[in-house]
Image (cartoon, coloured by chain):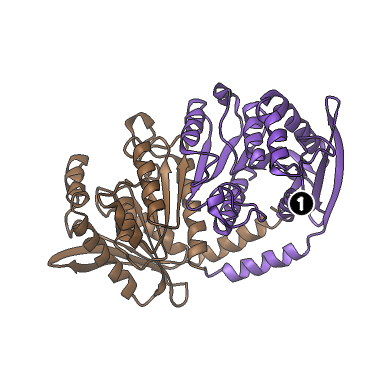
Chain colours: A purple, B brown
Amino acid sequence: MRNGFLLIAIMAALSARAELVSKSVEYKQGETVLEGFSIYDAAVQGKRPGVLVVHQWMGLGDYERKRAALLARLGYNVFAVDIYGKGIRPRNPKEAGVEAGKYKNDRALLRARVRAGLEVLARQELTDPKRVAAIGYCFGGTTVLELARSGADLAGVVSFHGGLSSPTPGDAKHIKAKVLALHGADDPFVPAAEVAAFENEMRQGGVDWQLVAYGGAVHAFTDWDAGSDNTKGAAYNERADRRSWEAMKQFFAEIFK
Amino acid sequence: MRNGFLLIAIMAALSARAELVSKSVEYKQGETVLEGFSIYDAAVQGKRPGVLVVHQWMGLGDYERKRAALLARLGYNVFAVDIYGKGIRPRNPKEAGVEAGKYKNDRALLRARVRAGLEVLARQELTDPKRVAAIGYCFGGTTVLELARSGADLAGVVSFHGGLSSPTPGDAKHIKAKVLALHGADDPFVPAAEVAAFENEMRQGGVDWQLVAYGGAVHAFTDWDAGSDNTKGAAYNERADRRSWEAMKQFFAEIFK
């Protein structure tokens, strides 16, 4: 509106000053060595909210590093976790299904893996430990919900086209984080019955939750590399990508204030 | 974030300059005299997006005038329509049910009434006719969806806790507006089956649609006068009110750009 141009000009000027600093971080869960990715903007002073990023079923890769960089430009201290283990990166969907399946079928292990990453982020000097959130894509969306169900002390979690089912829905009562689920309304991998069960789980658990359904969006709607053919069940959707990113920013503005 | 304080300071300074100008507007649909409410910010220069506001089942009153003023402060040219007719203002929920029922059961009349209001807004000198949206609360939410189904040339419509059912779901194919439905996940007056039917209607019609479900919110969640007792099925919910208002602003930022 009337002040739009001025605000945009200021934000562009500040954004241009970003000095992103990134590094790989080795850490452990039990005896397993994991390799995450840390990134922040050195042009921002002092402690800042921390955002954990959990990868899709192909494991931590370029996609998650790009998302992490976008978040760092917003001023957050960002850590992209590694659930699978150092060097374990599926080469195709079949391998990814096997790898992701290990964790979907062992939620205790999944929780331990993501919690190990959360500890790395929480201990970093730049992280304001009272303002930490976790976001995840597909498999990562499922993972951040599982992290919340574990009772982790988080301000919020955001699932982008994540699977919403839980083998232990009663655990919702442990959730401290505010929950935002961003869902493709035509996602064949997260059907209506799963959405309804999730909503009921959240309701029964007394969780502060929201779910946004994006019309015309299927699975992986934020993944730039997912193609554009909805009939495959997974496809990039620019509109839903943009809107869900804005929804996340709005959510962060609320929970980090 | 880092620029948060600066932006807030600028916005507060600009917002303080608002000079709201309002007036009642008599207009007609057929032979029926209607009385709407027009409001804009005289501190804003030139043409601007127009926003139509459609009232709850009690008819156009203080609630809608306050919402209209909030929208005018955002820089829009705002017209709160009158669906019922000049002087027809139900005095209690029973009368409101009867009055609203007339229009819910005669969608052609409802469309004609809301279109008459849209014409008033579109003709106003301050309205940029290429950037017009409609929002509505409860009965008004139902109404703006019906307006969209009539094929009205709108950038978007937003329903706040509106009924989502349609006697003619095939009309969704006429929808030109982007559709945003903001829904209380525990609203007993808009049950899950109605939400599912709406989603399917939008899907079949090829509409650009989104639906946000707010956990813990029941009917009338934006109505400051609706009390706080969820067990009554209608209650104010500060969190869902704030979030849905932000969602609307985000939507407007997209459709009016």
Q: Is residue B195 left or right of residue A82?
A: left
Say what amino acid the circle numbered 1 marks: Asp
Residue B106 location, x and y as percent? 18, 53
Does residue B109 appear in the picture of this structure? yes
Residue closest to the eye, A156 or A37:
A37
Residue lying at 69% horizontally and 58% vertically, measured from the top left = B3
Q: Is residue B200 left or right of residue B2?
A: left
Residue A186 location, x and y as percent? 49, 47
Q: Residues within 10 Å of mark 1 (few under 14, many from 20)?
A: few
Q: Residue furthest left?
A: B31
The residue at which mark 1 appears reads as A62
Residue A213 location, x and y as percent? 49, 46
Residue lying at 63% horizontally and 60% vertically, measured from the top left = B7
Instruction: Assign a secondary structure to mark 1.
Output: helix
Does residue B220 appear in the picture of this structure? no
Q: Is residue B154 left or right of residue A215?
A: left
